[in-house]
Amino acid sequence: MLADQNIEMKQYVQIYNDNDDDDDERDRCGLIWSVEERGKVEDERLMHGFVLVLVPIGYGSEAMEAVILIGVLRRAGAIVTVASVEPQLEVEASGGTRLVADTFISACSDDFFDLVALPGGMPGSARLRDCKILQKIVSKQAEEKRLYGAICAAPAVTLLPWGLLKRKQFSCKTTCHPAFMDKLPNFWAVKTNLQVSGKMTTSRGPGTSFEFSISLVEQLFGESVAKEIGQLLLMKADDSNPQKEEFNEVEWSVDHIPHVLIPVASGSEEIEVITLVDILRGTKIVADKLISHAAESVYDLIILPGGTAGAERLHKSRVLKKLLQEQESAGRMYGAICSSPAILHRQGLLKDKRATGHPSVISKLNNKVDGSRVVVDGKVITSRGLASAIDFALAIVSKLYGHARARSVAEGIVFEYPRK
């Protein structure tokens, strides 16, 4: 869930496990599980076959990678603990996004995990590397032949110094972000998006996070569950559907750094919010305000993230409704992803506009375009959701800055993007 129940927009994303009301309250209050509580979780795991996963985060961890990992694994049914290696639970991740962990890494030192998965980012990977408790946890994971993985800079910056890329019992072929490939020994390094070597899985960057996460799901739960989760995430099954379709093409260029509003509510889809914020902030597009203050500013672009419950809360916001109406009247850009195109439709903001959305809402749109991951009509942009959030964000970059800039951003996050 995002932000607080009574606040419609915040500057950070709060991550916690939605197991039951007690857990929700515990996580909201930032309380730490006691040893007794963790013992009970372990007993429950043994009794019911729960799958336990640890995702550590530190200052400068790559937000997209962390949130996609957490979101995908939780959708598959894993109990994911997000642990901070910093002195505080609230951690400033890449791009200034703030993530709130479930607990501190010190509280996890004696726990059992089926998987430990390290997000990348810098200096996040170095912060993880310098955490002795985490090093002990991951080293034990490898010694006991349980699953562990790392993405982006983490294989080279974190696992390599720990000596976890040269274990004798399996082939240690490893991949990582292109910027860190030279740190890997030549006979270990492979330039693939995903590399599974025994119990160790590595991947390249934010743009390969879904592939990385689904691979971990398959190793934990099996091929059928991984396939099902991939379909729920709207991952690309083949290349038969167009990545983007555009109608009534107009320029989106502005003569200043674009100001973008991304309102979030409780129940907004974290993966979409973080992907949009991470990619757009990387291109110097920044907007951070409480929704009550948003009416005081003018935005070049307003984007509604999805999530069924979140979209409904956004729909009920009178301030946001007024902002969107003014946006249309002034001929400025706006859009929505996942379930939120239906909100634009209900507010009369898709009149005579072609659009797409999540399969659960696309039938509600009058001029729907089914199949395309992103649809642009004039100054309105919509997308299917979840795994297409990267395509959506890059399409926005392309409209504002041009195709070459979008392609450059895509290369930086290691995401396949069309040359033309």
Image (spheres, grey):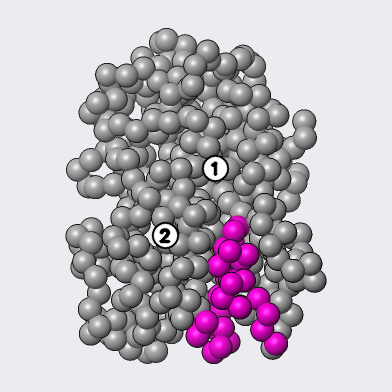
Residue 72 seen in the current view? no
Residue 329 seen in the current view? yes
Q: What residue type is labelled 1?
A: Ala
Q: Position of residue 172 (x, y in %)?
A: 71, 77
Q: Residue at x 58, y 30 (%)?
A: 397
> Looking at this view, is 416 or 378 the one in front?
416
Q: In this view, does 8 lie to the left or right of 165?
A: left
Q: Position of residue 355 (x, y in %)?
A: 55, 29
The residue to which callout 1 is attached is: 389
Q: Which residue is drawn at 54% across and 32% down?
A: 283
Q: Is residue 188 left or right of residue 302?
A: right
Q: What residue type is labelled 2?
A: Gly
Q: Which residue is drawn at 39% across and 89% down?
A: 46
Instruction: For label 1, count other residues whose C-alpha is less than 10 Å away and answer few (under 14), some (14-19) or many (20+).
Output: many
Q: In this view, does 226 lie to the left or right of 256?
A: right
Q: Residue at x 32, y 69 (%)?
A: 104
Q: On the image, which quarter does residue 304 sit in? A: top left
> Looking at this view, is 156 or 346 the one in front?
156
- Going from N to C along the chain, the mark reached first, 1 or 2, is 2
Residue segment shown in magenta? 139-168
> Looking at this view, is 121 or 193 the one in front?
121
Q: Is residue 214 magenta?
A: no
Classify the position of the C terminus by image quarter. Answer: top right
Q: Does the magenta stretch include residue 140?
A: yes
Using the image, determine if residue 349 lies above or below residue 174: above
The residue to which callout 2 is attached is: 58
Q: What element carries label 1?
A: helix
Using the image, determine if residue 320 lies above or below residue 325: below
Q: Is mark 2 on a helix, strand or loop?
A: loop
Using the image, determine if residue 332 lies above or below residue 231: above
